[in-house]
Image (cartoon, rainbow, N blue to C red):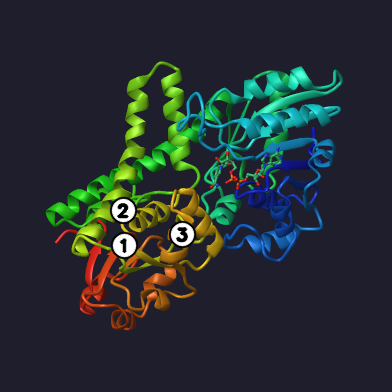
Amino acid sequence: MKIQSICCLGAGYVGGPTMAMIAAKCPDIQVTVADMNDKRIAAWNSDDLPVYEPGLDGVVASARGRNLHFTTDIRGAIAAADLIFVSVGTPTKSYGIGAGRAADLRYIESAARLIAEVSQGHKIIVEKSTIPVKTASAIKAIISANSSSEATFEVLSNPEFLAEGTAIADLENPDRILIGGESTPGGQEALEALVSVYAHWVPRERILTTNLWSSELSKLVANAFLAQRISSINSISALCEATGADVDEVARAIGMDSRIGPKFLKSSVGFGGSCFQKDILNLVYLCESFGLPHVSEYWRQVVHLNDWQKSRFVEKIVRTLFNTVNGKRIAILGFAFKKDTNDTRESPAIHVCRDLLREQAVLAIYDPEVEPDSIRKDLAEAGVSPELIASNVEIVADPYTAVDKAHALATLTEWDEFKHLDLARIHHLMLKPAFVFDGRAVLPTTALKAHGFDAFVIGKGG
Ligand SMILES: NC(=O)c1ccc[n+]([C@@H]2O[C@H](COP(=O)([O-])OP(=O)(O)OC[C@H]3O[C@@H](n4cnc5c(N)ncnc54)[C@H](O)[C@@H]3O)[C@@H](O)[C@H]2O)c1
């Protein structure tokens, strides 16, 4: 079976870039990304894309209008497609059974119902969203109960491993593509059809095929292991601060052991992003549901340590500023959850800013890519009152305005431009003593000391 037309439900951080790459690499396939969010679709069709990602503009420009389309006509897109990626959100459930842990699958379910309603003939449905293991059987049950008798379906799992900030490089040159399918002849035929899409640019040996459940579970496990590395090194950052050790030196020393490896050992104020926390909690809930409380407790600690890391950073700031930040201006450099993205979902900056505002600090926030409205919305959703946001939050267009007459400066995202700040100018602009809290260890440490800052760098003792 040769795929000629693909549709993707969900034009978010995954659906948009992933489909843009498929369209760019497969000019023989028509690719349509469909979403009911008309503002988002309009942005995908404009020069101001809704997702900031290095290299994304070029990939979109190379295919848009040729074989890459963005539309709100979800039904039309499903009807025309041989293969449908489902790339809708799967946030943590905030209500009822499993609240705070389980995945909320309402968008997955409504997508499945719509596919069943609209489809004629044969369709391959591909789970691109990150979902709990066994979701494919729920999708199949919904579809078989709701579709017309002539329609036939196969369900595949094809989780996405791209990281925001490096999405284009990750999509172009992935470590692996994972595709899970059923062992039936129909399942294997669908699996081969999807393999042949990726084989347009990914070497065959990097396309891994498994059964459905291994594929679904591997995505959650990959994110849990990645987040665990961050929590592990962050736990050691606290010990380094207490003992005079330097976490970067420790990370280097352990990372040179080939069994450990050097990547993802950068200590920080904590991990963020829409995936790590939600996917670990999802794994925690799965383990609980399968009667494995010890396993669920083990993974839950990765999230607890991350929450503690954010809280202890705020405590460090308050304690250092003579136990009060009331009315004090604190410059916040960086609000995105990491560099090279405009995504702020679960950003540690939200937690840190919220807690500083509860202490009555005045925040001057600078981020090169995040929209001011998005910062205000995040703080409001985190429980900061509109009055406090209006009176105590200033969002500024450059770092020097942020630090002007500030009592302290905190880095919360590791944007490259922070490495090259004019520290002499910053020191001059700030009130003295000029306190720096480098939550991302992004500023040049020796230069900070040389310029006379009173600097705390995460994970550095002494
Ligand atoms: N963001 C990442 O780095 C990343 C990486 C790998 C996997 N994932 C997973 O991919 C999935 C999507 O994540 P995201 O960051 O792109 O989310 P997102 O919130 O940016 O995008 C989801 C989009 O789906 C749309 N949508 C919801 N229901 C729909 C429907 N029935 N039809 C069409 N569109 C619909 C929403 O309007 C929204 O625009 C999640 O399961 C996530 O866990 C995310």
On screen, residue 181 versus residue 30, left or right, reads left
Ligand 1, image quadrant it occupies:
top right
Q: Which amino acid does label 2 sit on?
A: Ser
Marks 1 and 3 sit apart, C-alpha to C-alpha, by: 33 Å
Residue 299 coordinates in the image, percent (x, y) = 36, 32
**CA distance for labels 2 and 1:** 8 Å
In the rendered structure, the answer to whether residue 255 lies left or right of residue 292 reads left
Mark earlier in primary sequence (2, 1): 2
Residue 378 point in image, percent of width and height: 49, 53
| Distance from Cα at disc 3 to Cα at disc 2 | 34 Å
**Amino acid type, residue under disc 1 in the picture:** Ala
Does ligand 1 reach within 8 Å of label 2's beta carbon?
A: no
| Residue 301 percent location from the top left of the image | 32, 35
The answer to whether 236 appears left or right of 174 in the picture is left
Density class for disc 3 (Cα within 10 Å; few <14, some 14-19, many ≥20) is: few
> Mark 2 highlights which residue?
267
Label 1: how many residues lie within 10 Å, few (<14), some (14-19) or many (20+)? many
Q: Can residue 165 be seen in this view?
A: no
SS of the residue under disc 1: loop
Please report the residue visible at 43 percent of the width from the left and 68 percent of the height from the top: 416
Of 413 and 197, which appears nearest the observer?
Answer: 413
Looking at the rendered structure, the kind of residue marked 3 is Glu
Q: What residue did someone put label 3 on?
A: 387
Q: In which quarter of the image is residue 229?
A: top left
Residue 441's disc is 1
Q: Badge 2, how many Cα within 10 Å: few under 14, some, many 20+?
A: many
Q: Which is in the foreground here, disc 3 or disc 2?
A: 3
| Vertical side of 52 occupied by 284: above or below | above
